[in-house]
Amino acid sequence: MQISDIHITPVAAPDPPLLNAAGLHAPYALRLIVEIVSDDGLFGWGEIPGGEATRAALELAASQLIGLDPWGLHAIDAVLEALAKPDERGANPWDQRTSVHVRSAIEAACYDLMGRSVGRPVVDLLGGAARDRVPFSAYLFYKYEGAGGEFNFERDEAATGWFAARGEAALEPEGVVAQARAMIAQYGFQSIKLKGGVFEPQAEVDAILALREAFGADMPLRLDPNAIWRVDTAIAAGKQLEGALEYFEDPVRGQENMAAVACALDIPLATNMCTTSFADLPGSVAHESEAIILSDHHFWGGFRATLGLARFCAAFGRGLSMHSNSHLGISLAAMVHLAAAVPNLTYDCDSHYPWQDGHDLLVEPLPFEAGAVTVPRSPGLGIEVDREKLAQLHQRYLACGLTERDDEVEMQKVQPGWTFQATRW
Ligand code: GKR
Ligand code: MG
């Protein structure tokens, strides 16, 4: 079997104005959809965060892979390695390295293709299912007024459920609790994460304490200020949250600061910001910077790399969970197959998917039941892409004018003069 063609389609998915430490989500989340076609007429899909820099790197990589065997992943790795330029994660909550994105997109599409060619689900090619259902947590966000994309303000006025929790109302702990109740009523999640780093730390601590009061001690809770707090702020906040948090995600920036907070608190720390690559693992061991690593195949360079990370976590006593950015159904399917194949996945995974509010490019989106997604057993990723919807999302990309994610610029549109600060409180 040979790779005969690779199609790369940038798409823009409607995204609500979610707040985070770096600013505000734009009305559209940018994604890149990759389809690898083989000489025997089969195809496989991959999805990664979008942006023109990543698209250029992906186009270059694709041009070098034609004629290779999609089963020959080491040979493909060698080509991608030779093309990779040095790049950095950056200070934003999300990872900006194009090289890991490219590897992940190509590898996921090859696995989908391989699975389709032998009639087996991707999870089987990754060693088999350690679980049949992958549990996710409710992912709460403080939210600006408005809904995503062309649905903007007018739709938001009629919004119900978690979409309605916004602005000043959401700043109150009751607004956060209302958002959690609405999201859980629809999806059945059995754990809750609050994206923090947006308001004064005490407001976010109070929101967690209100969630604890509302849902009781059996509901696991997480808070993620995306590394925007100082060490003293994180320790003072954490002292109030001991006994209430399942884990405290990236309260501060950098492995040494994380280690200082970890030493002072009786709460496990988790990260998708300070230990995010294999090059970071020696530092993680030296500093004991976190107890839990949040994997992400888009950022660790694919499924096999994440399985390697899982072995590190098992050997060095780290817990393992899964991070998410705004994404569509191809990424969700990939996350589900991978999470099912990781024996030591010790926590419910993150997913932004509910915030896409049904806007997807699949014929049949994967359903959540009791907060979990059942691992598809049909060949490959077990999904069918609706090519018409893909074309529509591509048209939105062409029309929306966004080319890179920039939450600071979006925030400045509603709060002129606002600037991102790597450490704010
Ligand atoms: O999408 O606003 C967001 C999140 O803040 C995202 O960018 C982060 O990467 O969800 C992420 C996290 O857990 O840090
Ligand atoms: Mg995080």
Image (tube, rainbow, N blue to C red):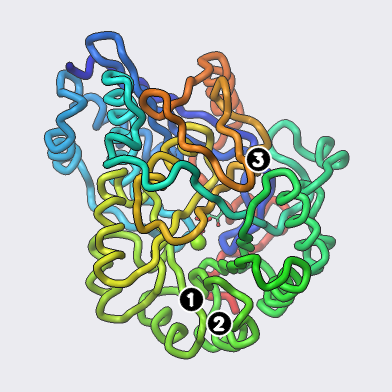
The image's mark for residue 252 is 1
As measured in the structure, the alpha-carbon distance from the residue carrying label 2 to the one carrying label 1 is 7 Å
As measured in the structure, the alpha-carbon distance from the residue carrying label 1 to the one carrying label 3 is 28 Å
Are the residues at dot 2 and dot 1 in contact (C-beta closer than 8 Å)? Answer: yes
Classify 47 as above or below 65: below
Q: Quadrant of the C terminus?
A: bottom right
Q: Secondary structure at mark 2?
A: helix
Q: Nearer the viewer, residue 156 or 423?
A: 156
Residue at horizontal 60%, vertical 88%? 239
Q: Where is residue 59 shown, x and y percent of the image?
A: 30, 29
Q: Quadrant of the N terminus?
A: top left
Badge 3: residue crowd in 10 Å (few <14, some 14–19, many ≥20): many
Asked where in the image residue 281 lies, by quadrant, the reply is: bottom left
The three-letter amino acid code for the residue at tag 2 is Ala
Residue at horizontal 74%, vertical 53%? 144
The three-letter amino acid code for the residue at tag 3 is Pro
The three-letter amino acid code for the residue at tag 1 is Val
Badge 1: residue crowd in 10 Å (few <14, some 14–19, many ≥20): many
335 relative position to 350: left or right: left
Asked where in the image residue 346 lies, by quadrant, the reply is: bottom left
The image's mark for residue 27 is 3
Residue labelled 3 has its Cβ within 8 Å of some atom of ligand 1: no
287 relative position to 15: left or right: left
Q: Secondary structure at mark 3?
A: loop
**Mark 1 or 3, closer to the camera:** 1
Q: Where is residue 206 shown, x and y percent of the image?
A: 73, 76
Residue at horizontal 87%, vertical 39%? 158
**Mark 3 or 2, closer to the camera:** 2
Q: Which residue is mark 2?
A: 234
Q: Secondary structure at mark 1?
A: loop
80 relative position to 298: left or right: left
- Point out the tag, 2 or 1, that comes first from the N-terminus: 2
